[in-house]
Amino acid sequence: MMPGMSEIPRSPRLERLAVLMAVAVFIGIFIVPLGLRPMVMPDEGRYGVIPAEMIETGEWIVPHLMGVRYFEKPVLGYWMTAAAFLGFGENEFALRLPAALSTGLAAGMVLLFVRRWTARWDIAAIAAMVFMTSVEVAILGTAAILDAPFAALVTASITFFFLAWRATGPIRFGWLFASGLACGLAFLTKGFLAIAIPGIVLAPWLAWERDWKALFTLPWIPGIVAIATVLPWGIAVHLTAPEYWHYFFWVEHINRFTGGARAQHPEPWWYFVPIFLGGMFPWCLTLPFAIGGLRRFGGSPETRLLLCWTLIPIVFFSISSGKLMTYILPSFAPAAMLLAVGLVTYFKGAPGKRTHGEWLLIPLGGILLLLTPFMPIDPSIGSAWEDGGEWRLAILATALLVWGLFDRVSQRTFDPAERVLLGCLGPALVFAVAPACLPTGWMKISKAPVAWLDTMEPIASRSVVLARASTIHGAGWAWPDAEIRLLGSAGELTWGVENFEEHAEWHVVEDELLGVLGTATIDHPVLVLTDRPEEQRTWLEATVDAAGLPRPAYRSGRDVLIAVWPKEALEAD
């Protein structure tokens, strides 16, 4: 048990309640709302279309996006989504289920680590809830991208290694084996970072502990197991697509890390500092209290490991040329553990300490509730929801009010563990209802196009669809039976299109548009799907006017345009 834990009151009832509440928070945030919001493009479309193609084509080794070889990631994330599709159908719930379950795995690792550290189930469950109620975790854990599965497997790999370091006898081998398996699965999800992140965390930590023997002996078993986990698919993809490893290593890793302004997503060195602090909301607001609590019981191997685990990946990715907010997700689990333990320790020494969060939350909830009757319900005049559902604002306002009440009650609670536990419930409620309250009426249709595109499915399914790179993911999901081809700039598909001759005909450059339009008939139309409606409509009309071709029929929404040749085909529908 960590120093000072024996001084904190312990209640078997609270321990049972905390574990049950952690399970309820996971279900409420990460399972129940999964299908309540529309798909967001391009990421969710990409990670939905690729697994759907795997199921349709039976090609499980080499990922393809819209029929084009797509080498940006390994294969495990696509396999997980395909398995969810086979079990639950091709829908938004199944699409996001792997990310949600992975976040549950990460929360379980947090619980396991803190239970081993503190010998307390209540504090371990609180740490898991602090993790799940951090805003970046809540968002990425309910989004169909690969960062949540990857971060969860990295979290498992580091946690299992720590448990092996603490263990003796045969059980140590079991934990090391599990660490290597998790590392290998993380590699199959996102690549070489699965090796880099545990390495840059665990090696400095063991050096800090001056445990040189463990530093040079313990990594061998996880390393061998990780290689054995990756090897079958690694060999298979090399035999099927020999170009894979060259592209994946040099373009997706080395160039992204060292490419400077030419790298994908270049950002300044300090980019991750506000991202991390904002991503830890609302718990970042408690940081001074948590630091005070951690200072009271001094250092330990666990605190040193968690500090390395939190800070070193942030520094590592700050050095990289390419940066995305999702990269530092592996740092959120250790930060949540430090925050939870620090807060419980701090409030043990400062019972009744006021934090005054309710002074913001209750007035904000009340203002939103008062505004609800005055919200426009007609989408044409600015309704936040396309169905005029202003009741959603009332739900969000009520959740904020309840959060404020929980915060007020927690400040009158003198049991430190119970106080932090109550503090978890307010943000959990807000994050649970937020997906249903997403203001889709204010979103660009190109960001959430599926419902709008579904209305055009009858004509799209019998058309040649020419879609811009920015809209092709939505077309691929909404119109799976259509003949879809890429129009103009290839975007993220550039490498696949330029390096494989079999994809050349599928890609229609702008100079080839007139040739495709010449094949259009009423029974087999040509449909162009693009964003930037005004600019693209002007370009399309100038192109066909110059060639003496008739103008198309149009359908348009917020920042999306569909043009159909011949126009009689759309009118017939």
Image (cartoon, rainbow, N blue to C red):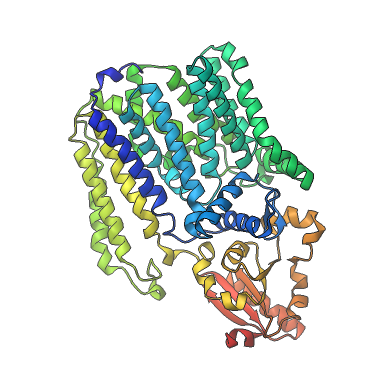
**Looking at the picture, how far across and down is residue 501, in whole percent?**
82, 59
Q: To which quarter of the image does residue 572 belong?
A: bottom right
**On the rendered structure, is 335 left or right of 222?**
left
| Residue at x-position 32% and y-position 25% | 120
Q: Nearer the viewer, residue 71 or 153?
A: 153
Q: Residue at x 23, y 62 (%)?
A: 370
Above or below, comparing residue 513 to residue 506 in the picture: below
Say which quadrant the N terminus sits in. Answer: top left
Task: State whether residue 282 is above or below residue 536.
Answer: above
Q: Is residue 318 above or below residue 216?
A: below
Q: Where does the C terminus fall, quadrant-wise?
A: bottom right
Q: Is residue 566 visible?
A: yes
At 58% from the left and 63% from the top, the residue drawn is 477
Relative to 161, say whether 425 is above or below: below
On screen, residue 2 versus residue 357, left or right, reads right
Q: Position of residue 291 (x, y in %)?
A: 36, 26
Q: Position of residue 306 (x, y in %)?
A: 46, 26
**Location of residue 128 by image quarter:** top left
The residue located at (24%, 24%) in the rendering is: 10
Residue 87, given in percent of the width and then of the height, sits at 52, 54
